């Protein structure tokens, strides 16, 4: 995993030092040296370092003693940012190549091809590594919770999730299928990019629906995976689209969707987790108190 992020971090450090390596367009060079890009490069380096720290914690015995909120927060952030790219970009690039015989997207004319290979290759490897490590960690630490289907949320929790997650999912699906137009994420016109938007929509809706329909599906781990990835995606993709908007100017629709989706998906996911953990704890207490009664029943 560390090897995977080295090219990406090296490129960011070069840009911060004043290098314009990989950038071929004069306008892009000027933007690269602007305050917005400098801050963005610093933030992404910090995020990469946090991802490395998370990976180390997930593979060490002492990692089991890290407070759950830290692990869930870091893993959720990584999941929400990377899952749509990991699932959508390879598929979208393949579709675009078959339809248009190229994989070019907005911004590629401003940079050398190897830049995109380094950036998205790093993202992909990072996403796979964290996914595998986090899943194994969760199975070891929260096996009892994951062995039971997510608890169906109450009506208020469903209403909160619906208000935030479904509008974001619907909008992303529309922009992915029909194009971003003037309201959606600007410069996301290529098929590869629009596929990422569609995958984002699918993940958001799946995360909302999984706990509600869980009683009809006897696949606890698959349901938990859908809930986790969907809620994390809904929580992170709105702010990510706002912060990464072309020219630093997000559309009003994108801002509204982010404001609704981020808190709603966090409340929805945490509420489902808390309800499920509570039910699992009650079942464990009931089984432990019932166990001594077994010999008496045979007398």
Image (spheres, rainbow, N blue to C red):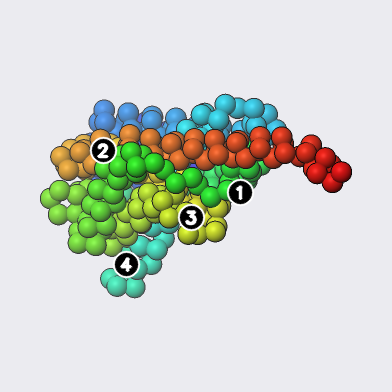
N-term mark: 1 or 4: 4
Any part of residue 138 in sight: no
Mark 2, residues whose alpha carbon is within 10 Å: few (<14), some, or many (≥20)?
A: many
Q: Is 134 above or below relative to 69? A: below
Task: Tell me the CA gap for discs 1 and 4.
Answer: 40 Å
Task: Tell me the CA gap for discs 4 and 2.
Answer: 32 Å
- From the top left corner, tell me how far across and down residue 159 is, in percent: 30, 42
Mark 4, residues whose alpha carbon is within 10 Å: few (<14), some, or many (≥20)?
A: many
Helix, strand or loop at disc 1? loop
Q: Residue at x 68, y 29 (%)?
A: 62
- From the top left corner, tell me how far across and down residue 5 is, in percent: 51, 42
Please give the residue where the numbered disc 2 appears in the rendered image: 260
Residue 96 marker: 4
N-term mark: 3 or 4: 4
Task: Tell me the CA gap for discs 2 and 1.
Answer: 31 Å
N-term mark: 1 or 3: 1
Task: Point out the image quarter for the N terminus.
Answer: top right
For marks 1 and 4, give the one nearer the viewer: 1
For marks 2 and 1, give the one nearer the viewer: 1
- Give the farthest residue toward the front: 299
Helix, strand or loop at disc 3? helix
Please give the residue where the numbered disc 1 appears in the rendered image: 147
- From the top left corner, tell me how far across and down residue 65 is, in percent: 64, 27
Q: Indicate left or right for 145 with 164 as reference.
A: right
Please give the residue where the numbered disc 3 appears in the rendered image: 215
Mark 3, residues whose alpha carbon is within 10 Å: few (<14), some, or many (≥20)?
A: some
């Amino acid at each position: 995993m560390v090897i995977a992020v080295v090219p990406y971090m090296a490129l960011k450090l070069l840009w911060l030092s004043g290098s314009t390596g990989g950038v071929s367009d004069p306008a892009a060079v000027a933007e690269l040296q602007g305050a917005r890009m400098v801050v963005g490069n610093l933030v992404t380096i910090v995020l990469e370092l946090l991802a490395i720290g998370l990976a180390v914690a997930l593979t060490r015995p002492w990692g089991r003693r890290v407070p759950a909120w830290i692990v869930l927060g870091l893993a959720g952030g990584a999941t929400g940012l990377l899952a749509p790219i990991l699932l959508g970009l390879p598929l979208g690039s393949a579709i675009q190549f078959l339809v248009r015989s190229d994989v070019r997207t907005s911004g590629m004319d401003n940079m050398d091809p190897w830049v995109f290979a380094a950036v998205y290759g790093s993202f992909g490897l990072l996403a796979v590594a964290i996914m595998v490590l986090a899943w194994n960690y969760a199975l070891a630490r929260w096996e009892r919770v994951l062995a039971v289907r997510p608890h169906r949320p109450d009506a208020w929790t469903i209403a909160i999730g619906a208000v935030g997650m479904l509008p974001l999912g619907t909008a992303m699906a529309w922009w992915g299928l029909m194009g971003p137009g003037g309201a959606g994420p600007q410069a996301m016109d290529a098929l590869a990019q629009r596929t990422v938007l569609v995958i984002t929509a699918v993940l958001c809706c799946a995360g909302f629906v999984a706990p509600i329909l869980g009683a009809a599906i006897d696949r606890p781990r698959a349901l938990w995976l859908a809930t986790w990835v969907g809620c994390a995606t809904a929580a992170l993709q709105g702010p990510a689209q706002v912060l990464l908007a072309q020219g630093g100017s997000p559309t009003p629709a994108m801002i509204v969707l982010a404001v609704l989706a981020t808190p709603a998906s966090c409340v929805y996911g945490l509420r489902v987790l808390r309800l499920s953990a509570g039910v699992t704890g009650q079942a464990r207490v009931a089984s432990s108190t019932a166990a001594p009664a077994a010999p008496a029943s045979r007398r």
